[in-house]
């Protein structure tokens, strides 16, 4: 299934929809205003929280935890590298890695070495707009949470880290 994430560039708080390829809202992402570090939740259309994302503060490099139903399901840590960004993703859902050009937002998410999601950014837009294609039998909400974390690291990280 293909999703479209449209994050408003000029907004005080992170609040945006994740739509299917036909423009129908599937999920809503809401960030907390006035909090230390990024804190976001992914909700279904009935308002039920499906995923909670929290940035760990006071770290040398960006680090995020992803929660489901109050339990941590993944930790995403940016690794110190010179040229190509790398991430350590510890997950209860498998071994995840990122492959491709993360700086240009054209990359794949691999699970146990096999591609399960393809991410690309649309550059001509009034919002940060990503196309995310996910294999049908994978956990779509979790993979969308990984994409959101990567966007937070590179987009918000540029604002917060200079």
Image (tube, helix red, strand yellow):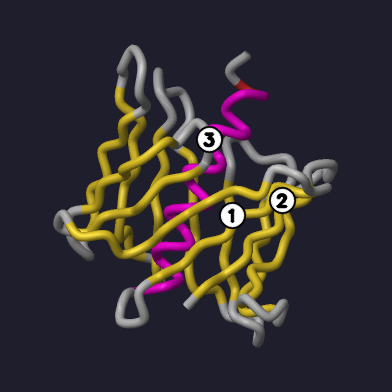
Residue highlighted by disc 3: 104
Disc 3 to disc 2, C-alpha distance: 21 Å
Query: What kind of element bears circle 1?
Result: strand
Tell me the quadrant of the picture where the C terminus can be found: top right
Residue located beneath label 2 in the image: 14
Q: Quarter of the image holding residue 86?
A: top left
Mark 3, mark 2: which one is toward the viewer? 3
Task: Assess disc 2: are there few (<14), some (14-19) or many (≥20) residues with their C-alpha within 10 Å of its C-alpha.
Answer: some
Q: For numbered disc 2, what is the local secondary structure?
A: loop
Q: Is residue 97 above or below residue 48?
A: above
**Sooner in the amino-acid sequence: mark 3 or mark 2:** 2
Label 3's element? loop
Along the line of sight, which residue is nearer the eye, 147 or 124? 124
54 sits left or right of 97 in the view? right
Q: Which residues are magenta?
A: 139-159
Q: Which mark, residue 122? A: none
- Name the residue tied to disc 1: 40
Looking at the image, which is closer to me, 79 or 107? 107
How far across and how far down the image is residue 137, in percent? 30, 82
| Residue drawn at point x = 42 percent, y = 54 percent | 146
Instruction: Determine the image quadrant of residue 59.
Output: top left
Q: Is residue 154 magenta?
A: yes
Q: Is mark 3 in CB contact (under 8 Å) with mark 2?
A: no
Location of residue 93 in the rendering, given as x and y in whole percent from the top left corner = 22, 65
Mark with earlier residue (3, 1): 1
Mark 1 and mark 2 in contact? Answer it, CB < 8 Å.
yes
**Residue 88: where, in percent of width, then height?**
26, 38
């Amino acid at each position: 299934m293909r999703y479209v994430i449209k994050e408003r560039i000029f907004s005080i708080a992170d609040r945006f929809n994740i739509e299917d390829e036909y423009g129908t809202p599937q999920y809503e992402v809401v960030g907390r205003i006035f909090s230390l570090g990024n804190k976001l939740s992914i909700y279904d259309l009935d308002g039920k929280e499906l995923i909670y994302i929290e940035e760990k503060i006071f770290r040398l490099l960006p680090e995020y935890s992803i929660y489901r139903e109050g339990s941590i399901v993944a930790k995403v840590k940016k690794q110190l590298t010179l040229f190509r960004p790398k991430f350590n993703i510890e997950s209860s859902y498998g071994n995840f890695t990122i492959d491709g050009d993360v700086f240009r937002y054209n990359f794949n998410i691999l699970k146990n070495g096999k591609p399960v999601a393809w991410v690309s950014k649309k550059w001509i837009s009034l919002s940060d707009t990503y196309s995310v294609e996910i294999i049908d039998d994978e956990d779509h909400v979790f993979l969308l949470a990984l994409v959101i974390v990567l966007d937070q690291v590179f987009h918000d990280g540029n604002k917060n880290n200079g």
